[in-house]
Image: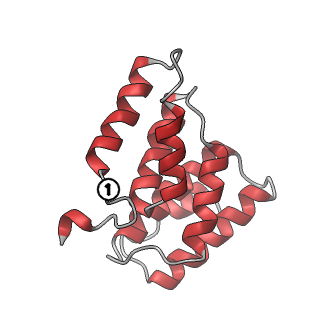
Amino acid sequence: MKLQDVKELPERIPEEEVYSLIGSTISDFKNEAISKNVFLEIMTELMERQIMTYEILKEPLRGIIDELIASMWNINNYNDVDIMLSLIVNFGLEKSFNKAKVSIENNSDIELEILEEIQETIAEVGNHMSNPYYGLQ
């Protein structure tokens, strides 16, 4: 799937369609049909559609995304960190969230901007990582 096609989707689409598109995007990325940057951009678009379902992302898809984002996590690129933190918070990815927290514990050469972004996210989420809708309840 192309990024432009995803951007042109309506704001609200059925949950099943969101799941199908996420699955296809993961498959394309794993098969190297799309780059990491395109993958992250498409996932951001699909995350925005998933949020509009007002449902917590279900397993096993949530776990698959969590494993993938955790494996991609790096603290060397602000754009990657920014996008991945958004995916982590809005999809409720606990493993990736914990990896983000650990990544700043013993790393003195992390850029200040990246460090602050991660720290702000940790402070905002608190103990409610698994439920992105906690603040709306």
The residue furthest top is: 109
Out of 109 and 79, give the one closest to the viewer: 109
Residue drawn at the location 49% of the way across and 48% of the way down:
98
Residue 119 position, x and y percent, is: 35, 34
The C terminus is located in which quarter?
bottom left
Residue 136 position, x and y percent, is: 19, 68
Residue drawn at the location 61% of the way across and 49% of the way down:
70
| Secondary-structure class at tag 1 | loop
Amino acid type, mark 1: Asn
Residue drawn at the location 53% of the way across and 22% of the way down:
107
Out of 112 and 26, give the one closest to the viewer: 112
Mark 1 = which residue?
127
Out of 106 and 17, give the one closest to the viewer: 106
Asked which colour scheme the image uses, the reply is secondary structure
Out of 53 and 45, give the one closest to the viewer: 53
The N terminus is located in which quarter?
bottom right
